[in-house]
């Protein structure tokens, strides 16, 4: 049987773009269908525009700290519309580059929503295309709970396109998106309350990072409230009124939900094609991103393995190598460095203390709590913290964590060491870069009892 394409990719996000480009480089005839904009969650409505807003939100604090270094800062004025316009222009530029990359690789971009009609057929509008292999790379979508009045809440998608900066914001959720946007709005000058139903924010991260971030956020003015949730939302003349689980109410200009993301598989036709899905709609795949249908594959957030852009890129690349270059590659999902662009930021790689104890039993903990050098003159009371987790039996460093200035940049290099299985002795034998916060990772000698 002849096909229109060797590979048809549904979704032009990070994973889909990488898979299609690499597959085309091996001689495959490839098409990508995208119903919105090329670039996907990360480029269009995720990590890139969000980090631009994070940068912008830091200036208010930077202006305050500048006086300690002899700078006199004059009248301060912030214009939200200017920031959003500049952000939008940069996203337009990046989308154009992504399109050029696909075109240069010989990949055909088909605009429109694609649905699967059979294991080898994909429909976009009125046209049905055939493909030897189909790759699902549609990512995830913000999910909101079934709360009365939830239609009055926004998500991170809408937060990136607000016409005006709200004077007061309630952020519901405790994950990295929630803490990042709480920091963004707080830095811009909004009054921010963050609500999280569990005992501490950032579930799944190391407990020392979780508690320290909550403390630092409160010091910066974010009203972080844990153990409380929203039971109802009412639209008011000035914004919204929230009823909380403790019986109290809370008024604000806006409420934003950041309570998780769900695989974007609804209405895609996967069930009709016989593709197995998890309860949350995620596409079930094996270690080579294969579904139970031989011609259908999936990578990225839609598989709900690890919801990170670099992981989706790794999975897409591994898929192309495996299927179109006869080089079986299984993307690894251990020791993945990641960052939370909170304020202060977090960098982490490997196991948390709790997970390391469960896996190895006997572990050693090394930590350092300090005031970054920058703040000795700025007058800020923000502190930094670094932590190494060591398997006592092998001396391998199995976890490294940091909260503080430049944590996201520092953890990339530390991630290489943890991924390579280096020992604490090898960390100790490495010469420090002085003066820096990064040097703490090779200077920690005091073991926590």
Image (cartoon, rainbow, N blue to C red):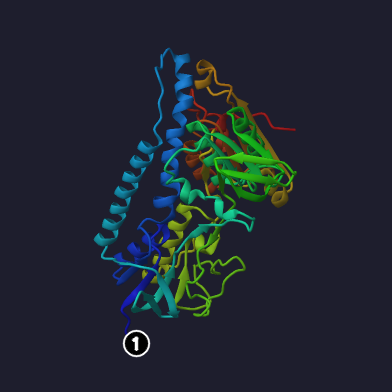
Judge left or right: residue 316 versus residue 379: left
Q: Secondary structure at mark 1?
A: loop
Q: In x, y percent, where is residue 385? A: 60, 31
| Residue at the top extreme, as displayed | 70
Tell me what residue is drawn at x 65 percent, y 47 percent: 203
Find residue 78 and report its horizontal and vertical position in percent. Answer: 41, 30
User: Can I make out residue 422 in this image?
Assistant: no
Question: Pointer 1: what residue?
Answer: 1
Position above or below: 382 against 248: above
Classed neighbour count for the residue bearing mark 1: other residues with Cα under 10 Å, few (<14), some (14–19), many (≥20) = few
Q: Quadrant of residue 19?
A: bottom left
83 or 344, which is in the foreground?
A: 83
Image position, residue 275 (x, y; %): 52, 76
Residue 321 coordinates in the image, percent (x, y): 39, 65
Residue at point 59%, 26% (across, down): 383
Look at the image and tell me in which quarter the C terminus lies.
top right
């Amino acid at each position: 049987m002849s096909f229109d394409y060797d590979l048809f990719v549904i979704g032009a996000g990070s994973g889909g773009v990488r898979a299609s480009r690499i597959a085309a480089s091996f001689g495959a005839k490839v098409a990508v269908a995208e119903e919105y904009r090329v670039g996907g969650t990360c480029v269009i409505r995720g990590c890139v525009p969000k980090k631009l807003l994070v940068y912008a939100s830091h200036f208010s604090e930077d202006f305050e700290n500048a006086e300690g270094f002899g700078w006199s800062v004059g009248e301060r004025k912030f214009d939200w519309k200017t920031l959003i316009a500049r952000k939008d222009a940069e996203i337009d530029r990046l989308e154009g580059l992504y399109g050029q990359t696909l075109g240069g690789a010989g990949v055909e971009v088909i605009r429109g929503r694609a649905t699967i009609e059979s294991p080898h057929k994909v429909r976009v509008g009125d046209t049905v295309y055939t493909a030897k292999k189909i790759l699902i790379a549609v990512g995830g979508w913000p999910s909101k709970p079934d709360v009365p009045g939830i239609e009055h809440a926004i998500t991170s998608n809408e937060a990136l396109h607000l016409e005006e900066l709200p004077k007061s914001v309630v952020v519901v959720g405790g994950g990295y998106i929630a803490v990042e946007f709480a920091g963004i709005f707080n830095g811009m000058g909004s009054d921010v309350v963050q609500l999280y139903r569990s005992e501490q924010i950032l579930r799944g991260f190391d407990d020392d990072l979780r508690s320290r971030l909550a403390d630092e956020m409160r010091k910066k003015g974010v009203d972080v409230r844990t153990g409380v949730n929203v039971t109802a939302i009412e639209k008011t003349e000035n914004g919204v009124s929230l009823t909380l689980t403790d019986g109290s109410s809370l008024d604000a200009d806006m409420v934003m939900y950041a309570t998780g993301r769900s695989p974007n598989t609804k209405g895609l036709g996967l069930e009709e094609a016989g593709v197995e899905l998890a309860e949350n709609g995620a596409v079930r795949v094996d270690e080579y991103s294969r579904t139970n249908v031989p011609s259908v594959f999936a990578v990225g957030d839609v598989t709900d393995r690890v919801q990170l852009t670099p992981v989706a890129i790794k999975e897409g690349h591994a898929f192309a190598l495996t299927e179109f270059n006869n080089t079986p590659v299984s993307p690894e999902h251990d020791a993945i460095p990641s960052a939370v662009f909170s304020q202060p930021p977090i960098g982490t790689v490997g196991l948390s203390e709790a997970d390391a104890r469960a896996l190895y039993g006997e572990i050693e903990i090394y930590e350092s709590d300090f005031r970054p050098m920058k703040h000795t003159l700025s007058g800020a009371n923000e502190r930094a913290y670094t932590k190494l987790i060591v398997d006592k039996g092998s001396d391998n460093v199995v976890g490294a964590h940091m909260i503080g200035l430049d944590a996201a940049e520092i953890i990339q290099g530390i991630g290489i060491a943890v991924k390579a299985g280096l020992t604490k002795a090898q960390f100790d034998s490495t010469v420090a870069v002085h003066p820096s916060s990064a040097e703490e990772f090779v200077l920690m000698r005091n073991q926590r009892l």
